[in-house]
Image (cartoon, helix red, strand yellow):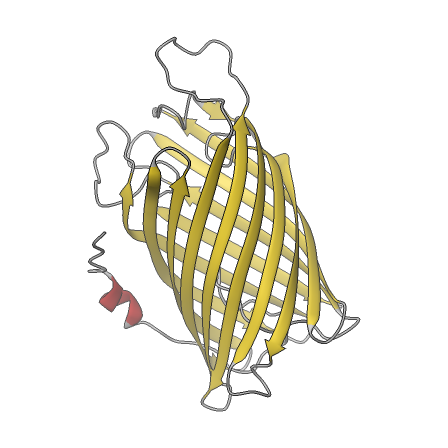
Amino acid sequence: MAISFRALPLSLAVLLVSPTTLAGENLFGHVKGAETLPKGSGELYQKLTQRSDKGRGHYTAYDAVTEFEYGITNSLSSTAGIKMQSIDTNGLLIEGYLPEEIDTGLELSGLEASLKYNFLSPAKDDIGLSGLIGFDYTWKDKHSGQDKQTASVETALLLQKFMLEGQLTWVGNLGMEATYAKRDEIDGLPEDFEWPTDPEMEIELIFGTGLNYRFAPKWSLSMEVLYETEFETEVGQERWSVFAGPSLHYGSQTWWATLTWLPQLEGGGEQYEDQSDTDLHLIEKTETEVRLKIGFNF
């Protein structure tokens, strides 16, 4: 598979990143740092993501995740969260993915939990290294809003390094997510409309990296690049996509906030009929993601 990354030079030219921060502070929208919370401390996170535009019709989805992270030891953190979602789509039907126009409003959609263990500290060692394992269960399809039972296990290696006396921070992520999914039947669909209800097994590989630069007290800018690809039971490699974009971060001693804009630069794999932009994957992904994350320290 060839990836030209023709838009990456422009994106990487904007690279700016961050210094020493509080352990739970999220400098990026998607990629994760290696630091864990100190023993006995906690953080409450609220994440809101807007996914929009599939090239035709109207498609806007919101994902809201509320998480609580707790430091079990200085090297081990645990996280638990609840998920909600809202999907509004019209003027676009995609066989196997978007069976009907829908406007759900915000509704409860799933639960999640994870553990992160720190092997090497980015503050004490040459480079930080942590391992993450996460469990995720949802009962709503994040793409269509239809009923769908999904159970996922995520594993990841997280790297982090401070440079320029902590003013510059680099992170790198390598992850894999294994998913079991089964859709519910939908009444009233045309007989020839594809909506498979047999169980599916999917494996997603995720590679991410980012730089953060602190340009003023409490303020920093980041750039991150995210590559995702998915393999499914019957079709092999189903999709791949490259996202890249900047984040603006503010952090104080008691709370922090990160705003991220992440457009899709390139993508491939399955496409829907008459898809206008053939350089992007727009069945399961969208052209643009915007994410706001807010955290409170305890």
Viewer can see residue 250: yes
Residue 3 left/right relative to 190:
left
What residue occupies the far right of the structure in this picture?
40
Q: Residue furthest bottom?
A: 165
Question: Would residue 30 be visible to someone looking at this image?
Answer: no
Q: Percent position (x, y) of residue 57?
A: 32, 29
Task: Provide residue 253's location: percent of width, then percent of height.
Answer: 67, 76
On the image, which quarter does residue 110 sit in? top right
Residue appearing at x 35%, y 73% in the figure = 15
The foreground one among 99 and 176 is 176
Quarter of the image for residue 275 reads top left
Q: Position of residue 136 (x, y in %)?
A: 61, 45
Looking at the image, which residue is at 48% across and 37% down? 201
For image coordinates 49% across by 24% down, the residue present is 198
Q: Is residue 37 left or right of residue 47?
A: right
Question: Residue, x 37% and y 15% (percent of image)?
Answer: 193
**How many discs appear?**
0
**Up-down relation of residue 185 to residue 145 (above or below):** above
- Whole-percent x, y for residue 195 in the image: 43, 20
